[in-house]
Structure formats: C-alpha cells, structure tokens
Amino acid sequence: MDGIEAGAYRIPTDRPEADGTLAWDHTDVVVVRASAGSVVGTGWTYGSEACVEVIRSVLAEQVDGLDALDVAAGHERMLRAVRNLGRAGLVAMAISAVDIALWDLKARVMGAPLCGLLGRVQSSIPVYGSGGFTTYDSSTTARQLEHWVGTDGVGAVKIKIGESWGTEWRRDLERVALARKVIGAEVELFVDANGAYTVGQAARAGREMVEGSGVVWFEEPVSSDDLDGLGQLRGRLACDVAAGEYGFDLAYFERMLAAGAVDCLQIDVTRCGGYTTWLGVAALAAARNIQVSGHCAPSLHAQVAVAVPNARHIEFFHDHCRAEAMLFDGVLDAGDGVLTPDPDRPGHGMTLKGPDAEQFRRM
C-alpha cells in the first residue's frame, strides 16, 4: 500500500428535501483513494468533510505500507487506532470509506470483480425506489413514482412519512394513499418515518396504512434506539418493521437482533465499517434467519449484496443515485428493477470522474 488520499465533495439536491425529522439541500460525499503502484482503489461515505481529517490524521498511517491483499489487517488496525476517539458516527464513516477503498484495491490488484472475489450467490439484487420526500407536492411525488415503476421497472417503492415529527399524520396518510393510487396494486409500497412517531402513533398510523393502502414495510416507525418500541410494533403490525441504518459497529446490530426488533435488518456499508463489517452483520442476521437490506449507496452495495444469501434488496435512493452518477464512472443502472454487477469490471467497477468531479470538491 503506497498511500491514502481523501477529499470532500458536495452535491446540491435538485430541490429542497425533508423527511420526518430532518431537512437538507445537499449531499456530502467523502472519497478515499488507496494506491498500490499504479492500481487505485476507491471508497466513499456520505458523511461530513470532518471525516477527511480523521482519515488524514489517524487512519492513513494505519494502512500505509500494508500488503494490498491484507484488508483484514488494515481494518483491525483502524479499529484499534480510534479507541480514544469513539467508534460511532464520523469515525465509523471514515473507517467505512477506507475499508471500501481497500477492498476495491485488493480486487483490482487481483484483476477480479469484487463480487467474484467475495463469491456470488446471486447474479443480481432487487432494488426499491426511495425518495418521496415530505417537501414534495403531489405532482412531484407522482412523477418520481411513475419513473421508478415505468422506467426502472422496480417492484417496490418507498416514501417518507412522519412529517414534522409526526404532527402531520393526516397528510402522511393522504400521501401514502396517493402513492398506492399511482403505483397500482402490484407494486409493493414501503414507508419510512425516520423515527418521528411515538409507539402509539406508529401503531395507529401503521394499521391504517396497511389496511387502507397495503403498506408492507414500515421503516423506523420509532427511533432506531427504541428497541423495545420496535419490538412492540413488530408484534402489532401486519407489515415488516425495518431499521439498522444507524449501526456503526457489529455490537449495535447484535443488540438489535437479540431484541427481536426487526423483520429485516438494514445495513449501510458507508457507515457500519465498510464491506468488512457488512459481511459480519449479514452473517449475524443469517444466524437468526433474518434478511438484510443495503441502505442507500446502491452502486456500492450491489457488490456485497449479491455475495450473501440473506440479502433481500438495496435502497435505490434518489440523492445517492444522483451523487454517484455525478462523481463516478461505472455506476450501475436499475434495469428491470435489479442491479447486476459487471463481471468484466475489476473491483466494484467505479472510478472517480476526476475533472468532472472537481466542481463539487470542497477540500
């Protein structure tokens, strides 16, 4: 390993966006490039530019000089080096970006696609269209849903609910009903409250959405830290309860699984610790007969999702699809509602666009 480079990029959203508990107008991307001779591996996380300083000042020296094939050693060194910094949050996201870059580098050095190196158990992985922000009016929501179903051929879509911390629940129900009307009876309908509701609110709204609109997936109906509340709702609602996107280490996911909190465990490769931790979490879930889903970052998740038997699908998130297409060559398209890694492209198949990406660079 000859060195690690890190930079931060900012992609403006195409219009103001919000979910139940947060509003934003841009997507930040921290990109890592790991080199071994002329071979370069690329990784990234959707995190603050503060991650760049963690990578430059702490993580880079832990992997510099390692054999490019020793990804496990690099991952372990990074974990040990951040003991006094705190593992969760920005630090875990920084580790994730480096770990992804190391796996990409290893596969490229070996001249193999990453999914081939890991070992495929399926050739493609389904995606679900994700967006439907609470700031969208009815026509904008309808156009987005129609595109996912009509153009991308997805078999499931997800919209945001829980507007204004659950205080606009009547509009939530109206928007869910609109989504069902637009997508028709055959496409599965998911909702995501981003932890905005109380247990009682989520139970009442959930029953109406399931019975009235056929909702089959309720993501973070309450805070993902409320394992007891998630478990209660899982027992009361006739739809899947999902959470896990804010997991930053293996122990977090084990606690969620042990609590019986979810029907499907979400894992974010750009947060959890990269591909190394993602594979470990998928194994923990498989031991409990629980499926996993890749949270956002669709093109990064495709490589690892096809390598585990209990992967259900990947979130085809509007913001991340835009950001990946603007910053990287080799991103995957959702043809017929699935992502299919290219077996002829080494690594995860993506490279930074270089000059085209510079307009978005912040540091």
Image: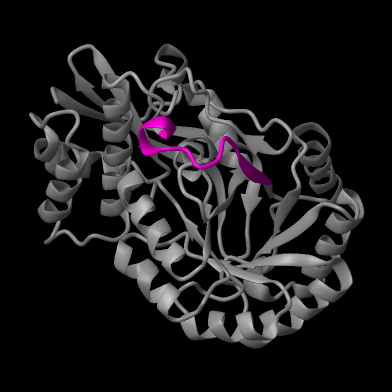
Depth check, front residue: 23 or 186: 186
Q: Is residue 218 above or below residue 81?
A: below
Depth check, front residue: 69 or 167: 69
Task: Specify whether 2 is left or right of 152.
Answer: left
Residue at image position (90%, 52%) is 184
Depth check, front residue: 58 or 303: 303
Q: Is residue 135 visible?
A: no
Residue 333, position as x, y percentages in the image: 63, 28
Q: Is residue 83 visible?
A: yes
Give the magenta-colored segment's residue range. Answer: 115-128
State which quarter of the image contains the C terminus: top left
Q: Is residue 308 above or below residue 166?
A: above
Q: Quadrant of residue 164?
A: bottom right
Whether 125 is among the magenta residues is yes
Residue at image position (74%, 51%) is 156
Residue at image position (41%, 78%) is 258
Q: Is residue 141 above or below residue 21?
A: above
State which quarter of the image contains the N terminus: top left
